[in-house]
Image: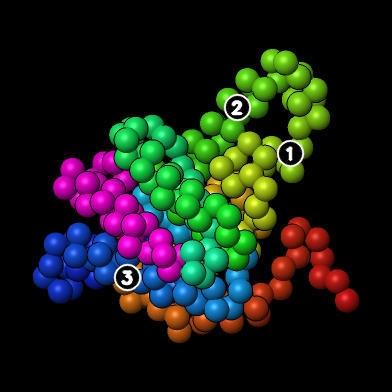
Amino acid sequence: MDGNGRWAAKRHRPRVYGHRAGARAVRKVVELATEIKLGYLTIYAFSTENWKRPANEVQALLKLLKDYLIKELPELNRENIKVRIIGTQDRLDPSYLTEIHQLAGETAQNTGLNLNIAFNYGGRLEIIEGIKKLFQESKNNPELVDNLTPQTFGNYLYTAGQPDPDLIIRTSGEYRLSNFLLWQSAYAEIYITETLWPDFDKVEFLKAIIDFQGRKRRFGGIESE
Ligand code: FPP
């Protein structure tokens, strides 16, 4: 969800003002995802590298996630949306962690859109945490390592049981993955738009989807007839 800072700077406002506008954009995008019956949507809200930002910005982002969950919970349940927070527990205050996971847990029974909020998320760390989990389990069950495949390793990631992403949308004209879903994005289509995240709305989202529908996906093979 890139470009919040630049969106705020254009308006001579602090960066946090842009993040608040970014949170409003999340609402619209989730709404459209529900309308078109998307199965899975992952939004990248805070990376393991974002701790390098000034303390007031980090605190504001932590608060924005919690406020979003508190405020949107009734609507998320009405719309049958299941929220999961994916990321590492490192550096997060345990009481804050309990609170956000409890809030997300209140949507656990829903069966519609699966909404992943990547928070304190880093793709490399996700892979390392997966390896550590596998290593622990393999102590009692060494075949786990012998039988490991790209498919079974996926079960050790935060997104266990979920399909790989088809489309990754990057706003504000940045041409990089920034440690996002590194394992899962092996064959994802990438769509880059100059639009800053707070301006990303339903029309922008539909433009990305229509562009995706025109892609020829070969997954390393050749085009079938
Ligand atoms: C990147 O833009 C954006 C972030 C690091 C934060 C995104 C978080 C939100 C929109 C908060 C809402 C979250 C939820 C779950 C409701 P940037 O700050 O790097 O912008 P810049 O590149 O223009 O400086």
**Residue at 55% across, 79% down:** 35
* Position of residue 207 in the picture relative to residue 28 (left or right): right
Q: Nearer the viewer, mark 3 or mark 1?
A: 3
Question: Badge 3 is on which residue?
Answer: 24
Location of residue 158 (image quadrant): top right
* Location of residue 137 with respect to 6 vertically, above or below: above
* Location of residue 132 with respect to 87 vertically, above or below: above
The N terminus is located in which quarter? Answer: bottom left
SS label for mark 3: helix
Q: Which residues are magenta?
A: 48-76
**Residue at 43% across, 44% down:** 101
Crowd around label 2: few <14 · some 14–19 · many ≥20 (10 Å): few
Per the picture, the main secondary structure of the magenta-coloured stretch is helix
Rendered image: mark on residue 108: none
* Position of residue 87 in the picture relative to residue 14 (left or right): right
Question: Badge 2 is on which residue?
Answer: 133
C-alpha distance separating marks 3 and 2: 36 Å
**Residue 149's spot in the image, x, y percent?**
76, 37
**Residue at 55% across, 47% down:** 182
> Visible in this render: residue 40?
no
Residue lying furthest bottom: 203
Crowd around label 3: few <14 · some 14–19 · many ≥20 (10 Å): some
Amino acid at dot 3: Arg
* Sequence-first disc among 2 and 1: 2
C-alpha distance separating marks 2 and 1: 13 Å
Rendered image: mark on residue 152: 1
* Location of residue 14 with respect to 138 vertically, above or below: below
**Residue at 67% across, 48% down:** 161
Q: Is mark 3 within 8 Å of ligand 1?
A: no
